[in-house]
Image: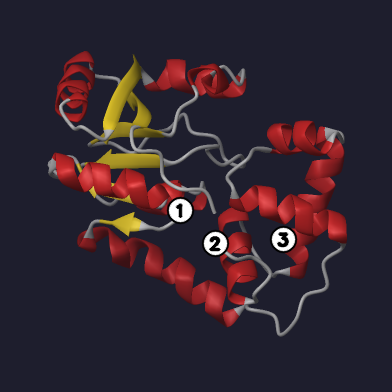
Amino acid sequence: MSEIPPTLSIAIVANDPLARAGLATLLAAEPTCEVVAQMSLTDWLADLQADEWLDLQLDGVVWDVGWSAPTTLPDAEPFPLPVVALLGDETAVPHLWSLGIQAMLRRDAPTAAMVAALQAAQYGVAALDPEFVTSVLPLASLASETLPESVDLTPRELEVLTLLAEGLTNKAIAHQLEISDHTVKFHVNAILGKLNAQSRTEAVVQATRLGLLLL
């Protein structure tokens, strides 16, 4: 596992320009953070679709979700890099968790908490506001109840699973393994089936519990 860089290059995502500017000011004052981009949610999703975020060489994103649940998020692809989501309430927590966002704080969280959550996210460690925990507990309970006794994954499926754990999209996995997007989707579906998982995030959790992954 790689070490956390001494300075995290981050992007600020928020639809409200004032919220973006406020977060950028707060985080830019932190010695362990460098704010390299600010954008709206629409622009960010467009950059993700086009893989333009790769050019920024980001270590993470701080996203001010706001007070209403977002309605323009993808349903299948997880976010390909660590994200700290700032929420007004727990409404969007389950959906964000299903997309692999495991760092979720309240909008009024201290800046130090945001930085700590960003650092934890580099290692795939969840960082949740205590009031958000109950929103994801049902998902954790389901994972325990459906945990298979043993799983026999092919070498290629193990490769895909490892890249899933790193948060890569199907497109990025296909590029890295030099296979087609369709083949990656086939392997992902096979992994979900063998692990009795309903989502990519749940598959990674199941695999970790079975010792197939070391995070």
Secondary structure beneath dot 1 equals: loop
The answer to which of marks 3 and 1 sits earlier in the sequence is 1
Q: Is the residue under label 2 in contact with that under label 3 (CB below 8 Å)?
A: no
Which residue is nearer to you in this view: 5 or 84? 5
Residue 194 visible in the snapshot: yes
Q: Is residue 128 left or right of residue 140?
A: left
Q: Which residue type does callout 1 highlight?
A: Tyr
Label 1 sits on residue: 123
Q: Alpha carbon of mark 2 to alpha carbon of mark 1: how far?
A: 7 Å
Which residue is nearer to you in this view: 65 or 21? 21
Q: Is the residue under label 1 in contact with that under label 3 (CB below 8 Å)?
A: no
Q: Alpha carbon of mark 3 to alpha carbon of mark 1: how far?
A: 22 Å
Q: Is residue 6 left or right of residue 160?
A: left
Q: Which residue type does callout 2 highlight?
A: Leu
Which dot, 3 or 1, sits closer to the camera?
1
> Would you identify the image quadrant in which residue 146 lies?
bottom right
Label 3 sits on residue: 192
Could you say which disc has been placed on residue 215 in the image? 2
Q: Which residue type does callout 3 highlight?
A: Leu
Q: Is residue 193 left or right of residue 83?
A: right
Q: Residue at x 53, y 18 (%)?
A: 47
Q: Is the residue under label 1 in contact with that under label 2 (CB below 8 Å)?
A: yes
